[in-house]
Image (spheres, helix red, strand yellow):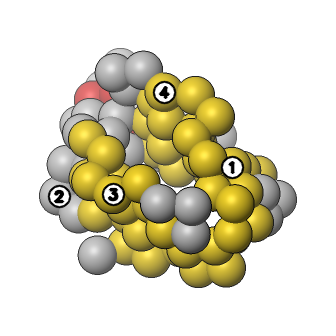
Amino acid sequence: MFNVDNQYDLPRDVVKKDILCQLIGKNELIIENYKKLLLFLSDEIKIQCKTFSICVKGENLVIAYYNRQTIIVKGVFHEISFL
């Protein structure tokens, strides 16, 4: 079920601290293990991850929730790119 990367069958995002992205429909994006928020506008949000950035473009974008590990972006998404 999970993409594991060690002898203990732990998920790779836990072992290597990779990001975990979940896109729920076209209106919610959950990102775990991000580093920091780079840009926050109502039509564009950029999030720095370990080795790349995620750029979300759309309409009425909001950060519905965040803590040190998880950020949830909601709105109407038009484009999600990995830079």
Q: Earlier in the sequence, mark 3 or mark 2?
A: 3
Q: Earlier in the sequence, mark 1 or mark 2?
A: 2
Residue denoted by label 2: 51
Q: Nearer the viewer, mark 3 or mark 2?
A: 3
Residue denoted by label 4: 66
Q: Nearer the viewer, mark 3 or mark 1?
A: 3
Q: CA distance from mark 3 to mark 2?
A: 17 Å
Q: Is residue 10 visible?
A: no
Taking the spot 61% from the left edge, 47% from the top edge, the residue there is 62
Of 67 and 14, nearer the camera is 67
Taking the spot 28% from the left edge, 63% from the top edge, the residue there is 53
Q: CA distance from mark 1 to mark 2?
A: 23 Å
- In the visual, does 51 lie left or right of 38? left
Q: Quadrant of residue 76?
A: bottom right
Q: Earlier in the sequence, mark 4 or mark 3?
A: 3
- Element assignment for label 3: strand
Q: CA distance from mark 4 to mark 3?
A: 14 Å
Residue 48 in the image: x percent, y percent?
26, 53
Q: CA distance from mark 1 to mark 4?
A: 12 Å
Q: Find residue 74 and name its label.
A: 1
- Element assignment for label 1: strand
Q: Quadrant of the C terminus?
A: bottom left
Q: Earlier in the sequence, mark 4 or mark 2?
A: 2
- Element assignment for label 2: loop
Residue denoted by label 3: 39
